[in-house]
């Protein structure tokens, strides 16, 4: 079976002279894994998340996401990949303030051409799955941080993508809310979603089955095997 | 070295955004900041209202003129004695009216003769204060030809034209302060009794300032020899041009150039055309306001795009393509502009209706003006929103998310 994420000697450089934010990264993630990509700030892990999420393209090396070569895809193809196969969770939630939790979650299906009523139906189910079935009509500013992040997770998984990318999902949360969010992510993983958590928090990373350590744009450790880079 | 996965190009559906959702996205952006949306739509609305009102007012006054012309007829021609080549004031031959009646297709004809006689309210009036009132000898059928109406009293007839009786035009009566028949006025050195006052005559305003007396008394008192100075004539509408070319040579075969033939309805139309020149000016001002409104929309959109970089990044992460982002912001700009356009059209219509009511015009507003106006607002919105929308679409998702 093909890995859902396959990176080989991936580099991403910025500016002139080029600064390498990602300096030859090789690893692959199989379907169904629950992985932490861990490293201090400035280690290049956000760049790595953008590359895995096809929001960005490598300047060298090869990246296959969902079985497709990112370099060979145009904007439309990569947008489709994000619409159907990748869910994103951000540290700052990125929820729309003016609309309800239900509408926020339903927006997760906006670019799949799903009809509005169907989007809302699926959004309600997704909110129930994250334990917020009673909060559908609340606006983000009426919710706690932990609840907001759960809304964001519901939005990421409402289309049932095989790959979920979470960038510092607990970074803005207290420890209790953070624990709830991590528990939710493992629950999703148990149901078959591949979950990749990007974090600087070693404690959080330690609770995950596999850890890929990043420093200065390079893989410096991979708990599943000896680093090959 | 790991082996590369077999490159299978996954067959997956494309990102898709429904048309209804595009509209919803466009309005959501506006609803999020209603005050700003309202203010920038106001710019378009003002320009739009100005243009619609100008077109409406001009159309309504034109409609009024058309009604007026339909009522008065455009088939009245006047032939006036002009000045000869040597500059002398000429008169028409005494049989001018009879000759005009012989012209084919002429339906009716009448005449007036201006006398060099001054009119005063009484013998005590200042001789210099003539009030611009002309004494005229009028044919008995004059009112039938110029469509004049008597407000009060009785028009000159065969009997009264032999006596010092006078009919006053509308303005003449006003200037003399005469309100009812029976009043005496000082005309050419003797008192004349007013026997009628006329309504205003739209097609022959020169008759409004005249005092009309009969031909017999004019002959006795002022040496009137039967030479008219103006001949009024009506023919069928289709024959006006043919008749017009025949009038001067008919009245004065020897010197047709001494006769000025004119069509009073043309003068009314010309006056209206002069008003239309202002319409052009106001339309210009309106379009400048619309342009400034468009710049306001562009400005709002640029700010909006800058403020919503995170939203753009998020939408890209959710699967929006660059065209999806472009369409969202373009829709927002066009909706903003359309809002202003519709609002402005309503304002313009209200302004037109108010002005029409005040001036007693029929309310007329070409539907095309609204279609063109709102269309222009949409185009302006599209143009104003295009560059900001392109900027939004080109925002790299990573930069947008991290900002």
Image: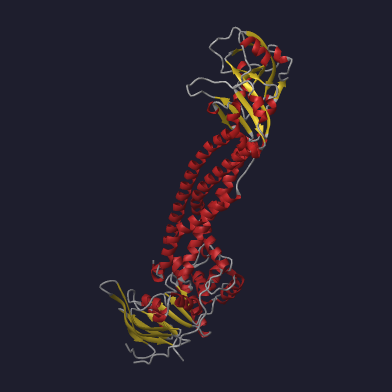
Q: Quadrant of residue A23?
A: bottom left
Q: Is residue B125 left or right of residue A40?
A: right
Which residue occupies 47% across, 21% down?
B86
**Residue B146 placement (x, y as % from top left):** 66, 28
Which residue occupies 48% across, 85% down?
B10
Residue B152 position (above or below residue B395): above
**Residue A122 placement (x, y as % from top left):** 59, 75
- The answer to whether any part of residue B134 appears in the image is no
Q: Is residue B154 left or right of residue B303?
A: right
Count every numbered label the image shows and give the total.
0
Residue, far front: B254
Q: How is the image coloured?
A: secondary structure
Residue B127 position (above or below residue A208): above
Residue B36 position (above or below residue B228): below
* Frontmost residue, A224 versus B64: B64
Which residue occupies 45% across, 63% down?
B389
* Frontmost residue, B289 versus B117: B117
- The answer to whether any part of residue B241 appears in the image is yes
* Frontmost residue, A119 versus B10: B10
Q: Quadrant of the C terminus of chain B?
A: bottom left
**Residue B47 placement (x, y as % from top left):** 50, 47
Q: Quadrant of the N terminus of chain B?
A: bottom left
* Frontmost residue, B29 versus B244: B244
Q: Is residue B84 left or right of residue B134?
A: left
**Residue B24 placement (x, y as % from top left):** 56, 64
Q: Is residue A199 left or right of residue B200?
A: left
């Amino acid at each position: 079976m093909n890995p859902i994420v396959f990176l080989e000697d991936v580099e991403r450089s910025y500016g002139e002279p080029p600064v390498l934010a990602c300096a030859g990264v090789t690893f692959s993630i199989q379907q169904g894994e629950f992985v932490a990509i861990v490293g201090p700030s400035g280690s290049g892990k956000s760049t790595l998340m953008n590359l895995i999420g096809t929001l960005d393209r490598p300047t060298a090396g090869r990246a296959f996401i969902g079985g497709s070569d990112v370099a060979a895809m145009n904007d439309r193809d990569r947008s489709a990949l994000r619409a159907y196969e990748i869910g994103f969770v951000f540290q700052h939630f990125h929820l729309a303030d003016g609309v309800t939790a239900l509408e926020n979650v339903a927006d997760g299906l906006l670019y799949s051409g799903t009809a509005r009523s169907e989007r809302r139906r699926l959004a309600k189910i997704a909110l129930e799955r994250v334990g917020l079935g009673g909060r559908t009509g609340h606006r983000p500013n009426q919710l706690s941080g932990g609840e907001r992040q759960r809304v964001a997770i519901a939005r990421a998984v409402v289309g049932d993508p095989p790959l979920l990318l979470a960038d510092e999902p607990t970074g803005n949360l207290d420890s209790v809310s953070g624990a709830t969010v991590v528990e939710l992510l493992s629950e999703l993983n148990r149901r078959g979603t591949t979950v990749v958590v990007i974090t600087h928090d070693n404690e959080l990373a330690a609770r995950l089955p596999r850890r890929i350590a990043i420093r200065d744009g390079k893989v410096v450790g991979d708990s599943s095997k000896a680093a090959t880079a | 070295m790991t082996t590369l996965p077999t490159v299978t190009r996954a067959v997956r559906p494309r990102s898709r955004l429904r048309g209804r959702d595009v509209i919803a996205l466009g309005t959501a952006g506006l609803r999020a900041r209603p005050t700003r949306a309202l203010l920038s739509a106001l710019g378009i609305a003002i320009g739009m209202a100005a243009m619609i009102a100008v077109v409406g007012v001009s159309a309504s006054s034109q409609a009024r003129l058309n009604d007026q012309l339909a009522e008065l007829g455009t088939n009245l021609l006047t032939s006036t004695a002009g000045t000869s080549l040597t500059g002398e004031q000429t008169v028409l031959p005494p049989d001018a009216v009879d000759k005009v009646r012989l012209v084919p297709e002429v339906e009716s004809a009448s005449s007036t003769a201006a006398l060099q006689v001054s009119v005063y309210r009484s013998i005590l009036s200042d001789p210099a204060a003539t009030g611009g009132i002309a004494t005229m000898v009028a044919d008995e059928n004059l009112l039938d030809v110029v469509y004049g109406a008597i407000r009060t009293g009785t028009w000159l007839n065969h009997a009264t034209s032999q006596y010092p009786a006078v009919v006053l035009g509308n303005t003449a009566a006003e200037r003399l302060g005469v309100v009812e028949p029976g009043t005496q006025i000082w005309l050419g050195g003797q008192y004349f009794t007013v026997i009628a006052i006329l309504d205003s005559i739209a097609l022959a305003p020169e008759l409004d300032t005249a005092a009309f007396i009969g031909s017999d008394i004019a002959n006795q008192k002022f040496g009137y020899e039967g030479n008219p100075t103006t001949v009024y004539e009506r023919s069928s509408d289709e024959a006006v041009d043919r008749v017009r070319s025949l009038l001067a040579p008919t009245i004065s075969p020897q010197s047709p150039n001494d006769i000025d033939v004119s069509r009073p309805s043309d003068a009314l139309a010309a006056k209206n055309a002069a008003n239309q020149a202002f319409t052009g000016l106001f339309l210009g001002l309106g379009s400048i306001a619309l342009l400034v409104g468009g710049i306001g929309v562009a400005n709002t959109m640029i700010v909006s795009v800058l403020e919503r970089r995170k939203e753009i990044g998020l939408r890209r992460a959710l699967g929006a393509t660059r065209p999806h982002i472009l369409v969202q912001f373009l829709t927002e700009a066009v909706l903003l502009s359309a809002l202003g356009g519709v609002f402005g059209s309503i304002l313009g219509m209200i302004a037109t209706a108010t002005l029409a009511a005040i001036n007693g015009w029929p309310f007329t507003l070409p539907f095309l003006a609204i279609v063109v106006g709102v269309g222009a607002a949409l185009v302006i919105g599209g143009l104003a929103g295009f560059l900001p929308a392109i900027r939004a679409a080109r925002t790299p998702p990573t930069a947008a998310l991290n900002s």
